[in-house]
Image (spheres, rainbow, N blue to C red):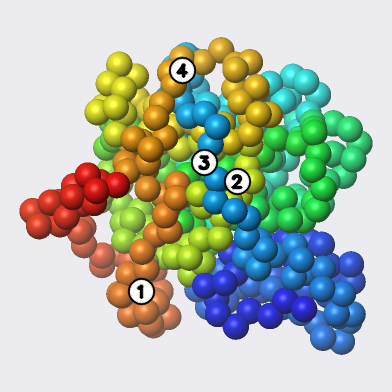
Amino acid sequence: MISIQDKHNCCGCSSCAERCPKQCITMYEDEEGFKYPYVNLNTCINCGICENVCPVLNQAEVRKPIACYAAKNPDEKVRMNSSSGGIFFPIASKIIKEGGVVFGARYNNQWEVEHASADTIESIKRFLGSKYVQSSIGATYQQAEQILKEGRKVLFSGTPCQIAGLKRFLRNEYDNLITVDVVCHGVPSPKVWRDYVSLLPMKGVYDIRMKDKSSGWRQYSFSLIGEDGKTILSEFSSENKYLMAFSHNLTLRPSCFNCPAKAGKSGSDITLGDYWGIEKLLPGMDDNKGTSFVCANTCKGAELLKSLALQIESADYDASTPYNSCIYQSTTEPVERIDFWNFYQKRGVYAILVLQPIKQNIFNRIKIRLKRLIK
């Protein structure tokens, strides 16, 4: 029976609740807005399935990708509407054209982030762009399993822990399944996001872009886009209070500080992320509009990538990871996190509105550079 004694040991993937044969596990939201499993002892039969499908209790081995690339989508419109190089869209489009179904994270009508399915090219556009909130998996693991058993192709995208949760949930390998995870810094609280959205001028908003590259990929912005395509609100990420709380690691889920699925442990076929450091490693691929760091983790993933029309160059994994440490290393838990959440319980979203930017002093910059050199 699943029992969470330390919240650092639950990533909230919902695999246990989705797989429980008696449906006696529900995901409840705690005071920080993160969901955890609750077992109804009156209906639990102690079958142990919930423990067997848990990606925290059953962590895979660390693995390196079989190939790495720097890649860009030649379609500039798609790339500008994506977080980095716009590689997810052609991957998902290929699956749709082959009669498959794509799962990914999107905004619902209340601007909450949820996992959903799509079976048209137009509908997968809602999955594009970074959404710095933990998405609700809902029943998508069960839906994906049913489609796989029907023989149709499935592309399931998510954070490493969500992909690890799906793989444990399925308990079988499927040739018609492709999994894509993202290089993840950590997932912020859905509660904080709801509270923050309530303060925004949402009338007439058509899209929220947490990584708007209009001012450049490196100095991206948080933007609200109207139905006419015009910008309603835009703030640099370094000035936006929600993104500041995210980058300060204050609003992240506790398990993000001890991630069970980094360093290839998720079992994904492909990993996608921003190629930070591209200007030093492969400057010919850098135009400050976004370049993707793409890892083919399996032969299935490598074959899929080779079938796409991309601007692509081979990359060195070991040389790249010092600039992209989130691919193998968990985020550091700040000592200020406890005080932040105590303050949040008293003052709500005001706790992030009073945050100030962190300015690195020369000592910290030297320390970061030394760590990169050592690695």
Q: Nearer the viewer, mark 2 or mark 4?
A: 4
Q: Secondary structure at mark 2?
A: strand
The answer to whether residue 253 of the structure is visible from this angle is no
* Mark 2 and mark 1: Cα distance apart in space: 25 Å
The vertical placement of 194 against 325, above or below, is: below
Q: Rate crowding at label 3 as few (under 14), some (14 to 19) or many (20 or more) other CA atoms within 10 Å.
A: some
Question: Whole-percent x and y of residue 177?
Answer: 75, 36
User: Residue visible at 22% across and 44% down?
Assistant: 373
Identify the residue under disc 2. Answer: 158
Q: Nearer the viewer, residue 267 or 196?
A: 267
User: Residue visible at 79% across and 43% down?
Assistant: 173
The vertical placement of 352 against 370, above or below, is: below
Q: Rate crowding at label 1 as few (under 14), some (14 to 19) or many (20 or more) other CA atoms within 10 Å.
A: some
Q: Is residue 16 shown left or right of residue 206?
A: right
Mark closest to the chain's N terminus, 4 or 3? 3
* Mark 4 and mark 3: Cα distance apart in space: 20 Å
Dots 3, 2 in contact, CB < 8 A: no
Q: Amino acid at mark 4?
A: Ile
Identify the residue under disc 3. Answer: 64
Identify the residue under disc 4. Answer: 312
